[in-house]
Amino acid sequence: MSTIITGRNLIAGLWLESDALFDSRSPSRPDEVIGTFPASSLEEADAAVAAARRAYPAWRRTSRVLRAELFDRLAQLVKRHTDDLACLMARECGKVLAECRAEVIEGLHMIQYVFGTGRHPSGEVLASEIAEKDAFVRRKPWGVAAVITPWNFPFAVPLWMLGPSLVEGNTVVFKPSEETPAVGQRIVELMVEAGFPVGVVNLVHGDGNIGERLVRNSDVNVILFTGSWDVGSHIQQVSATMVDRIVAAEMGSKSAVIVCKDARLDLAVNAAVISAFKTSGQRCVSAGRVLVHESLLDTFCEKLIAVTKRLVIGEPLDPASFTGPVINQHAVDKVLSYNALARQEGATVLLDGGRREGHYLTPFVYRIEAKSGIRCAREEVFGPHLAVIPFRTNEEAAAIYNDTPYGLSLGVITEDYRAMRFFREECEFGMGYVNLPCIGAEVHLPFGGVKRSGNGHPSAAGLVEAVTHKVSWTINHGEDIRMAQGLTTGIEP
């Protein structure tokens, strides 16, 4: 039996316990308590923001190179603790161990990327209209960033946000998901060990009320959020009234794999299974739909079901498991309700999804025609729930793909370079893959989407745009004043 973790907040360099607590429990064994964590008060959230605000001036003035070198120290610690981190994650969020190790490596890649940027250019030198002038564009940090993260990637996603924010000179308040507080706390413990100064990184545990308090605090300049559309859109609405407030939010999807008539069938089936059922369908980029050319439909479905039936849905720490449980009872109820909705909306069930003790669900797969108003094929389920939808032409497939409020990830299985280009141009997405699953992001590539999928996730490629703002800096090396656009000064020499 593992030792129960005692959770604490980190505010202004002090690890603080709380009288009000909540439990973090294993989704594979709901009776197993991973740890007890502070149910933080609103005042504690305010204190964390104030600590970050006090630490900001000195951190901003610290050399960017020296800020980055702290991430090199952090990288060495993560390498040393990779196995322990993966095991903790598997126990707390229910992902299988192989996925958890891969997530730790993903977080490490972000840390390494951020370390590397410390000595890279962070501005531009531009030509001026006036020969005697030098013109520069520089980037400055906004100030305090609130980092509000989900449970499904409790290690990598926080580091996607924390890393670029900190290396660019912002200070942070980090609120991990209440479903995975132990992993969130471990990240901060390692950052403290790496030597991040007092107040630069602050940690507050708690539920959505703590997130709401951070969002409504006008001393927070940047909100970095991954989660649902309902919460993300609320954050955007609250923030719209605030001066110097930036929101970067990724808010879900109804992603899909499109299987064209010339697709290699085994590759298509594997891509669909990985896209739909890795992490039990609980990735923001998970495929809730696979669109299949009608000429391949019967053969594809037969092979898809055969492969899906062989998947081992089991203990996260068992190397034989393909995937584990969903996160909690609410997730179980939601997925089962969408399974029932699919039947009500006329689906032909190909593989019936069931449940086992704990929060285990087996895949639910069905065929359905694309029709206006079909909810099960348009709304995000966030579980092992897959719609197989036939199409006749590439134009029809693109229209079906776009017929959802979301636009995050797309996989296209084809050997036809013209089809590749067509879907690249006609589908509404942020990340596209050819002859690959629609999951598998890399830290140095953009991560984000369109429509309800958000305004761009804070990835390495995009976060600098969110956590800094551009300023121009023009220097006159002449001995008199000459204005741009030929403007005269109106002052006699």
Image: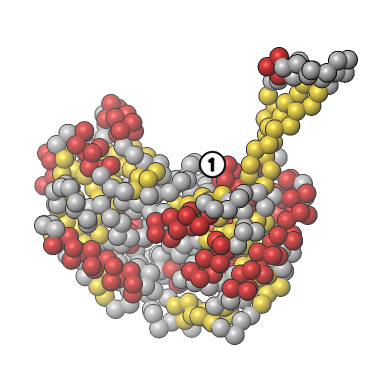
Does residue 297 sit above or below 316 in this rendering?
A: above
> Which amino acid type is marked by label 1?
Ala
Q: Position of residue 266 (x, y in %)?
A: 23, 45
Can residue 156 be spotted in the picture? no
Judged from this view, the residue extending furthest toward the bottom is 19
Can residue 137 be spotted in the picture? yes
Dot 1 falls on a residue whose secondary structure is loop
Query: Of 253 and 302, which appears nearest the observer?
Result: 253
Query: Of 15 and 323, which appears nearest the observer?
Result: 15
Horizontal relation, residue 485 to residue 363: left or right: right
Does residue 165 sit above or below 80 in this rendering?
A: above
Q: Position of residue 396 (x, y in %)?
A: 19, 36
Horizontal relation, residue 294 to residue 197: left or right: left
Does residue 296 sit above or below 127 in this rendering?
A: below
Instruction: Please name the colour scheme applied to the rendered image.
Output: secondary structure
Query: Of 449 and 31, which appears nearest the observer?
Result: 449
At 14% from the left edge and 58% from the top edge, which residue is drawn?
A: 345
Does residue 465 sit above or below 289 in this rendering?
A: above
Q: Position of residue 402 (x, y in %)?
A: 28, 42
Quadrant position of the C terminus in the picture: top right
- Residue with the mark numbered 1: 461
Q: Residues within 10 Å of mark 1 (few under 14, many from 20)?
A: some
At 64% from the left edge and 68% from the top edge, which residue is drawn?
A: 46
Horizontal relation, residue 268 to residue 105: left or right: left
